[in-house]
Image: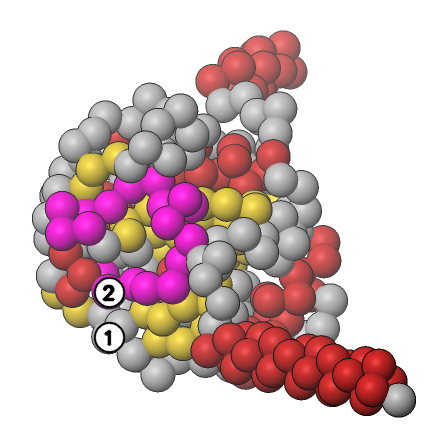
Amino acid sequence: MKKLLLAASVSAIAIAPVPANAALIAIFGDNNINTLYSAGGHTTTLVTDAQLATAGFLDSFDLFVYTRDGSSFGTSLSVAAAANVKSYVTGNIVLFNGDFQDDIGAANTDLLFNNALDYVISGGQGGYIGEYRGAFGAYSANGDGDNPIGLVNGVAGVSGAGQGGSNLDIDITPFGVGNPVTDGVTFPYDPAAVEFGAELSGENPSKVLARFANGNAAIIASEAGQISSAVPEPATWAFMIFGFGAIGGAMRRQRKANVKVSYA
């Protein structure tokens, strides 16, 4: 009997091997993403807002996934939780603008999510995957009234059915060609279950791997701190203009001083 049990155990291990890049994943939201990643040999832990609001809680995890429960629209992070997530995210980031988890089970979508996980893991501890609510919340402002995390200095509009072109086909961009996140995924990509999204703006276009047919960003990926557009924010422009004005004023004063010296 012991030999039979041992043989059965060995057989089970052979059927579901632990991947070489097995990760410890904290997930806010319980849906198909958790099912896919746990079945893939990764260790997933469903976490609460209260846990995320505790400083240092995420430090034992390789990455954080922000999504929603089942077919719900999800919930906002508290101010403390959003701040802790922002401090934690120092690795690679992937954002899915839409309810992509609803399409998990389709081979193309499963491949996309597994590619995203491998990419985020490759960036080291502190990675982030945001789907639907997790994508909008990653921006510095959003139309849904959620507490923003601020991983991207841009704006997500109000989310809803068909918003941002989320009911349209998805096309790969030149920046997505050859990218590990989109590797092997067939485009044009028609995830039948993706129907909800939001209009996004402010992200660096070179980090957008795929867009909805109307041009709105659908899949975004990059290292932390590189997703925001290179175009300065309004406050940055104001500071730069003030700086240029101060430099110009100093140069004019210097020229006047030189003229006075020469006349003397």
Res. 129 in view: no
Q: Is residue 69 above or below residue 11?
A: below
Is 206 colored magenta in this rendering? Answer: yes
Give the total of numbered labels. Answer: 2
Q: Nearer the viewer, residue 168 or 16?
A: 168
Q: Is residue 125 above or below residue 147?
A: above
Q: Amino acid at mark 2?
A: Ala
The residues tagged by marks 2 and 1 sit, at their Cα atoms, a distance apart of: 6 Å
Q: Which structural element holds mark 1?
A: loop
Q: Nearer the viewer, residue 49 or 17?
A: 49
In the image, residue 208 lies at what x, y percent? 36, 46
Give the labeled residue for mark 2. Answer: 198
Which region is colored magenta?
Answer: 194-215
In the image, residue 41 lies at what x, y percent? 53, 32
| Chain-order first, disc 2 or disc 1 | 1
Q: Quadrant of residue 253?
A: bottom right
